[in-house]
Amino acid sequence: MTTRCQSPTCNRPLRDEKSVRRGFGPVCWGRANPTAAPAHATPDHPVDPNQIPLPLETHVTKMLFEIDGKPTPIDDCSWLLYSPCGCMSGISTVRDGALTEDDAWADFEPNAEQRKRDKAAGLRVTIGLRSEVRNLATDCPHTPKWGVENTPVPDGHQWAQTVHTPRGRRKHLVPDVGVENYAERRYDSGNTAALCGSEGWSWGTAWHELDAPECLACARKAKTVQEGQNQ
């Protein structure tokens, strides 16, 4: 006959006659009766092969990372984001789901294309001590700030993205009037073209619309405009 362990935290199947008779497997019986035979293997008392091990008996190995040549517990580690200028500009915890450098990059920048651009620009992620959070910069003293040149925005333009577009779209440099037409719901105003030539009517500037990679064509034309103004 097969029944189940009467321990409320176990309820696992019992497969041998002795365990069925007392209503407990050897592990739970040993916990309920400290003076009883031990549940773990000894020369005089081998482990019952029919008893399923409890999760509490699993040995968990503490994960270690090597930092400066020394093994360091995961609880003392953090992922550190450095800008091209050398300033620390971000910090993230080392945890399940963020155990590799690629995981950490995805934490810092969810957009895959922007991650690729950030790496090309010289940003880097490395593992370090959690105590290094004190070096996190609230401002950057370098020029350009954070070691990255911002795309110039021509007069009368601003970054915007067409609303309700599929994922993977870019933000564009759009004339102010195009943003105003959508903000004020001028339905008869027609489409407005960005610097790159992409047209749209619903040019939005909410934070979630601007949290997207820049259109490279718009960026190139903006730099050309700036160079012409500087001549």
Image (spheres, rainbow, N blue to C red):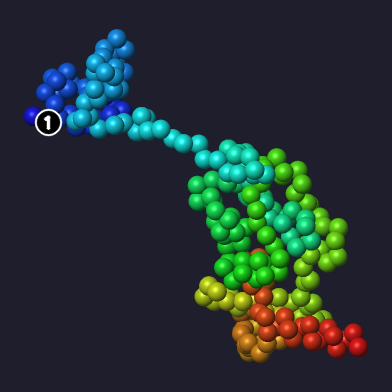
- The structure residue drawn at horizontal position 70% and vertical position 62%, both measured from the top left corner, is 123
Q: Residue at 17%, 18% (x, y): give it.
A: 22
Residue at 74 percent across and 53 percent down: it is 88
Picture coordinates of residue 19, whole percent (x, y):
17, 22
Mark 1, residue position? 2
Q: Residue at x 54, y 76 (%)?
A: 165
> On the image, which quarter does residue 76 sit in?
top right
Left or right: residue 59 versus residue 189 is left
Indicate whether 128 appears above or below 107.
above
Task: Identify which amino acid the numbered label 1 is placed on.
Answer: Thr
* Kind of element beneath mark 1: loop
Does residue 47 appear left or right of residue 121 in this picture?
left
The quarter of the picture where the C terminus appears is bottom right
Relative side of 145 to 67, left or right: right
Estimate the x, y position of residue 163 in percent, counting from the top left: 58, 75
Q: Nearer the viewer, residue 136 or 156?
A: 136
Residue 67 occupies which quadrant of the picture? top right
Q: Residue 122's x, y, as percent?
A: 71, 66
Q: Vertical placement of 74 versus 9: above or below?
A: below
Q: Is residue 227 above or below residue 144?
A: below
Q: Residues within 10 Å of mark 1 (few under 14, many from 20)?
A: few
Quarter the N terminus occupies: top left
